[in-house]
Structure formats: structure tokens, C-alpha cells
């Protein structure tokens, strides 16, 4: 079945001569069985009227944050839709998305959106080629937004250049891809461990590590966006967990172990937590006076959450993380084998790179020996690429189990 059939599409139309092509796109979407809501910017209304879109969709068209009687249409519209496409996207709208400006209904809805976003730029080639625009488009890409590049050809200014809105076929392909993404993990139970663990010595001192949990939180959010039922087991962090995910807050490794064991079985487990390998053998109820002597603390091993899951291997697709400072591939492959995993994401933390940075770089090593470089960039983007890679394997495994 065509994924467009019965899909909920939100279409943002910004100012540009290509706005008329958005009407043709709307018509095709409606004929394919999609329900389309349209948001127009004030500039778009200079090129084409809301009546065109409301006639095509048989639904109201939204042009202002202040349309009576609804107070907050931007939140409802992005919650009801499965995919958000902006076509045509002007240089101005792209710049606003890149910097988080929300000064009209379209940009406010984009900022509030947690659904996949597709952006199809259309502008004069001089504007498209500017370094500012290129930088803004790259910023969108890094955030996981799909860009449908404009085409070369005859522009409104009666000159030839790159800036024409992509063909309808390419726009529809991008919408179909995003819809498939939103359904990729539907019906799957996903468990993610994230963050550091904190091992107390006394009421005011502890052992921990600099993990922020950002990678695991990004993975949990992305999995939920793809339709999964997600549980996030999260060590202490200042970052907020995603709202559409069930979060279990833990402190120590032993709590993380117990919480994880309570939550399995799952279809996919991603262990992104930086679990403290040791804890103080003795934990003092009162603050230790510092005195004048050195302190020797005996540390004992913590349970290995992922090892325990690998040992019981009850049908879940198991993904581990390996943060390595040297002999990266060899160490990661060894962990993959030892912990009985299906894949391991190798994260190079040598030199300047390390925990807690907004950016990271990952390579995925598969159980069967293959590897996939996921590149480097924002953790949100890496989370999306990681699930792009793992999703099909998960479904392969489920298919094989049914045969
Ligand atoms: N892990 C875990 N429980 C632990 C330690 C690690 O679940 N007590 C998981 C991590 O979440 C990660 C993977 O195991 O997915 C690899 O962790 P890492 O600390 O890099 O590997 P170790 O096996 O602990 O090896 P080493 O510390 O010797 O490098």
C-alpha cells in the first residue's frame, strides 16, 4: 500500500513564485489518500490564496497564530501530523529554522515539531549559493531534517541556475521516506540505558564519570518518533528526558541493573549508559572527616548490565556502545563478541573528543563482521542514522523468527 494513503501531512508554504507548485503537490497528496493541513506564511499569501488550498484539501488553511477561535494551532497541527514538509522553503524560512526563530505560525509550528521534517528550498540561485544559506541548510541537515535539493533550470528572474523547487516526484519520495521512518519501529518495545551512574562514598562524595546521557536520550526520542514503545533507564543528568518516553530514573549501577532486568524482554535494547565499573566497597552513612591522612578506598566491581543481557539473550536485538581511546576496532569487536551483541557503536573518545560534547562520531560494527561509518555530527543526527541502520535488521530478525 502506498504510505501516502491515509497519511497525515502538514504542508508549510512560504513566499516564492514556486508557491503555486505547492498547490499541485497538495492535489496529488489528496488524490493519494492523504489528509493535508496547510500553513501559509504572509509572504506565501502574496503569491497564492488560502482558498486554493482549502478547496483542494476541503480543510481550513492556517495563516496566523492568532486565528480565532483556536489559541494554539501550532501544537495541535504538529501533533496530529506524521510528517511536516515545507515546500517551497524560502531562504528566510530556512534561516529562521536554523536559528530557532519562531515569529509566525509556520516557524512556531516547525520549532514545536517532533515529527520528521522535510524542507524543499526554492529561491534565486544567487541566494541559494550564498555561504549563509549553505550554512543554514547544513544546520538543518545536522538536525536530521531532510533537504530536497532544488534543481537547476529556468528561474523566475529569467535566468538559468540552481534554485527551482524539486520536482513533485522527488518531494513525494521524500514524504514517503519520512512516513516509512515514522512507522519503522511501530509495535516494537525498545529499551535504552543512558547517562552516568553515581556511586556514593558518603553523603557528600561520590564516584562517577562525565557522561551527560545525551546520546541515549537522543536515541530514545528518535525510537519513540519511529513509533516504538520506549523505556529509558536514565542515570543522574541535568538533561530532560523526552516526554513521549517512559523514563526510569536510577542512580547507582546496581539500580540500573535491577531496573533493566525488570524491563526486559524487549525487541531492541541499546545500552548507551556509561556505567561505573566499580563502586566503593564500603559506603559511609556519615560524612567522612578529612583528617590529615591520605584515603585509600577499596573499589569492588559493579554488575555489567549489558553482559547480563547478552548472557541470557532472550530474543532482543542487543546494541552496545564502546567508548575507546586506543585500538578502537579491536577493543570494540572484542566487546561485541564477549557480551554476545548484535552490533556495537564505536565512539572514539581519544584526544579532544570525549563525553558530553554535543557532537560525536560513530562507527557501527555488526556481529557478522561488517561495519558502517555513521559519520560525525549532532547526536540527534547520529541517533537517526543508527536507527536507520538497525531498523531493517530488526525486522529481518522478526521475519526469520516467524518463518
Ligand atoms: N555496560 C553495562 N554495564 C556495565 C559496563 C558497561 O551495561 N557495568 C555497557 C555500556 O553501556 C556499553 C558497553 O557495556 O554499551 C561497553 O561499555 P565499556 O565500559 O566501554 O566496556 P567494558 O566492557 O566495561 O570494558 P572496559 O571498561 O574494560 O573498556
Image (spheres, rainbow, N blue to C red):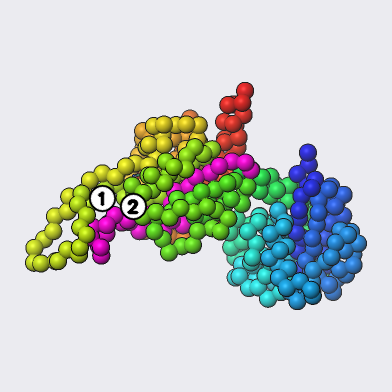
- In the rendered image, which quarter is residue 9 located in? bottom right
x, y (%) of residue 364? 48, 41
Does the CB distance between marks 1 and 2 fall below 8 Å? yes
333 on left or right of 170? left
- In the rendered image, which quarter is residue 290 located in? bottom left
Q: Which residues are magenta?
A: 186-214
In the drawing, what numbered circle is on residue 56? none
Q: Which residue in the structure is indicated by mark 2?
A: 252
Q: Nearer the viewer, residue 17 or 259?
A: 259
x, y (%) of residue 56? 89, 59
147 on left or right of 276? right
Q: Is mark 2 within 8 Å of ligand 1?
A: no
Could you tell me which secondary element the residue under label 1 belongs to? strand
Residue pictured at 22% horizontal, 59% vertical: 285
- Tell me the quarter of the image containing the C terminus: top right
Q: Which residue in the structure is indicated by mark 1?
A: 279
Q: Nearer the viewer, residue 318 or 150?
A: 318
Residue pictured at 37% horizontal, 44% vertical: 257
Amino acid at each position: 500500500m502506498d504510505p501516502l494513503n491515509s497519511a497525515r501531512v502538514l504542508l508549510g508554504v512560504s513566499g516564492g513564485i514556486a508557491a503555486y507548485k505547492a498547490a499541485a503537490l497538495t492535489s496529488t497528496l489528496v488524490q493519494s489518500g492523504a489528509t493535508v493541513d496547510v500553513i501559509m506564511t504572509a509572504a506565501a499569501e502574496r503569491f497564492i490564496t488560502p482558498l486554493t488550498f482549502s478547496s483542494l484539501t476541503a480543510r481550513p488553511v492556517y495563516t496566523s497564530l492568532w486565528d480565532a477561535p483556536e489559541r494554539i494551532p501550532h501544537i495541535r497541527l504538529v501533533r496530529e501530523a506524521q510528517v511536516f514538509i515545507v515546500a517551497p522553503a524560502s531562504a528566510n524560512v530556512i534561516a529562521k529554522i536554523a536559528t530557532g526563530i519562531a515569529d509566525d505560525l509556520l516557524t512556531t509550528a516547525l520549532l514545536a515539531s517532533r515529527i520528521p521534517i522535510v524542507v524543499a528550498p526554492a529561491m534565486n540561485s544567487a541566494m541559494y549559493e550564498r555561504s549563509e544559506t549553505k550554512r543554514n541548510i547544513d544546520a538543518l541537515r545536522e538536525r536530521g531534517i531532510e533537504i530536497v535539493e532544488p534543481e537547476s533550470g529556468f528561474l523566475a528572474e529569467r535566468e538559468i541556475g540552481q534554485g527551482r523547487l524539486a520536482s513533485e516526484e522527488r518531494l513525494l519520495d521524500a514524504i514517503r521516506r519520512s512516513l516509512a521512518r515514522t512507522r519503522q519501529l511501530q509495535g516494537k518495545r525498545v529499551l535504552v540505558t543512558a547517562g552516568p551512574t553515581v556511586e556514593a562514598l558518603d553523603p557528600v562524595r561520590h564516584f562517577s564519570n562525565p557522561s551527560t546521557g545525551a546520546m541515549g536520550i537522543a536515541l530514545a526520542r528518535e525510537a519513540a518518533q519511529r513509533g516504538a514503545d520506549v523505556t529509558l533507564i536514565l542515570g543522574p543528568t541535568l538533561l530532560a528526558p523526552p516526554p513521549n518516553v517512559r523514563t526510569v530514573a536510577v542512580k547507582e549501577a546496581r539500580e540500573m541493573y535491577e531496573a533493566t532486568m525488570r524491563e526486559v524482554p524487549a525487541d531492541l535494547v541499546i545500552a548507551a549508559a556509561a556505567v561505573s565499573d566499580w563502586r566503593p566497597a564500603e559506603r559511609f552513612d556519615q560524612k567522612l572527616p578529612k583528617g590529615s591522612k591520605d584515603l585509600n578506598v577499596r573499589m569492588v566491581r559493579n554488575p555489567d548490565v549489558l553482559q547480563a543481557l547478552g548472557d541470557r539473550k532472550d530474543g532482543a536485538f542487543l546494541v552496545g556502545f564502546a567508548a575507546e581511546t586506543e585500538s578502537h576496532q579491536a577493543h570494540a569487536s572484542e566487546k561485541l563478541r564477549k557480551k554476545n551483541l548484535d552490533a556495537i557503536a564505536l565512539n572514539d573518545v581519544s584526544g579532544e573528543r570525549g563525553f558530553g560534547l554535543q557532537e560525536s562520531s560513530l562507527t557501527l560494527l555488526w556481529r557478522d563482521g561488517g561495519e558502517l561509518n555513521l559519520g560525525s555530527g549532532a547526536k540527534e543526527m547520529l541517533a537517526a542514522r543508527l536507527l536507520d541502520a538497525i531498523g531493517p535488521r530488526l525486522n529481518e530478525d522478526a521475519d526469520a523468527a516467524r518463518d
